[in-house]
Image (cartoon, grey):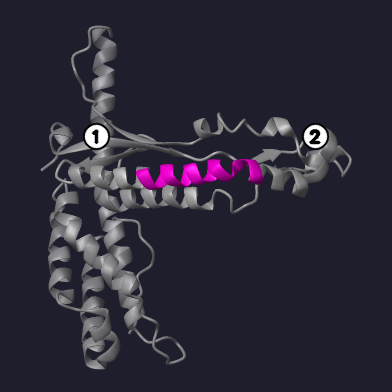
Amino acid sequence: MATAENMFREAALLQLTATCWQVDKKLPQALLADVGNVDFLRGRKLLLPPDSLARIKQVVGKARNYLRKIALPFPIIGCVLVSKKLIPEVQENLKKLEWEYNSMVEDFIRWYPETVQEARESLGELFNECDYPPREEIQTRFRFHWRYIVIGPSVSRVLPPSIYKDEVEKFQNLMEQARQEAIAALRGEFVDLVDNLTDKLRGSDDGKPRKLREAAVENLKDFLASFSNRNLFEDAQLSELVDRCKSIIANTSVNTIRTNSLVKENLHNQMQELLAAVDASFEDVPRRKLRLAA
């Protein structure tokens, strides 16, 4: 089990930097003054068409969502905690996303001159050549890279003993905060996934069945499959509930649920019971209101 003392024997900190050129800019105060009182105006202009960077931003979003699902939160901005067992998988997936990101950036740069010309025609008098970096420099506005950070309360040769003691205490508090946030994150994710599937299995208020999307089942199965590697702090309560959930949805397919009303009803009843057990176990964990009505 990972503790504040040995956390980094079981996991590593990962920091992802994924940026995209900011394509909007504040309008000059002088221009806004021609419209009205500048104290009440906050105008901005788009430098490029809204969809020109959409695909790049999608890759960034995909990378962040992937880490959100596979890693655990950590109380340092921009960092997540990755189980050492998952590092090879994370590394492989981030490399694929990096390649996809760079490919999208290359496409953007290829069409950049034409896109700027389109902006010139659309913005008219608001167009300013200085807002647009030369094509050979534009790539510096995009970054996609990650690194693993090693930290720990090593003996300091710089800090005085009294200050070092305070810093060690801060580090230990940080590790305890990381433990609490990681446990809460896994519990919250599990609750949301179970609650979502349970909600999709019950009838709506007008008597019509709710539409069951494959993602509602597959996302829960993905969580259950990766749980043992992400449960760094060996949350016994959650482990028990996860095992119970595995037995409920084992060998259950979306198609079977959709076509067999008996299977659907039975699954709904079991998930309702699971939610009740979750509600009893996680009284101290913030979460959205559970829907326990039939």
Q: Amino acid at mark 2?
A: Gln
**What is the x, y in percent for residue 45?**
71, 44
Please tell me in which quadrant of the rendered image residue 279 appears. Answer: bottom left
Which badge, 1 or 2, is on the more N-terminal residue?
2
Q: Residue furthest left?
A: 1
Give neighbour class at mark 2: few <14, some 14-19, many 20+ (Cα, 10 Å). some
Q: Give the quarter of the figure containing the N terminus.
A: top left
At x 40%, y 83%, the residue is 210
Against 37, residue 155 (above or below) is: above
Tell me the number on the disc at residue 175: 1
88 magenta-colored? no
For the residue pair 173 and 139, the one nearer the viewer reads as 139
The residue indicated by pointer 2 is: 29
Question: Disc 1 vs disc 2: Cβ atoms closer than 8 Å?
Answer: no
105 magenta-colored? yes
For the residue pair 6 and 289, the one nearer the viewer reads as 6
Residue extent of the magenta highlight: 99-114
At x 24%, y 50%, the residue is 183
**What is the x, y in percent for residue 105?**
48, 42
Q: Amino acid at mark 1?
A: Met
**What is the x, y in percent for residue 112?**
60, 42
Mark 1: which secondary structure? Answer: helix
Q: Is residue 280 visible?
A: no
Q: Nearer the viewer, mark 1 or mark 2?
A: 2
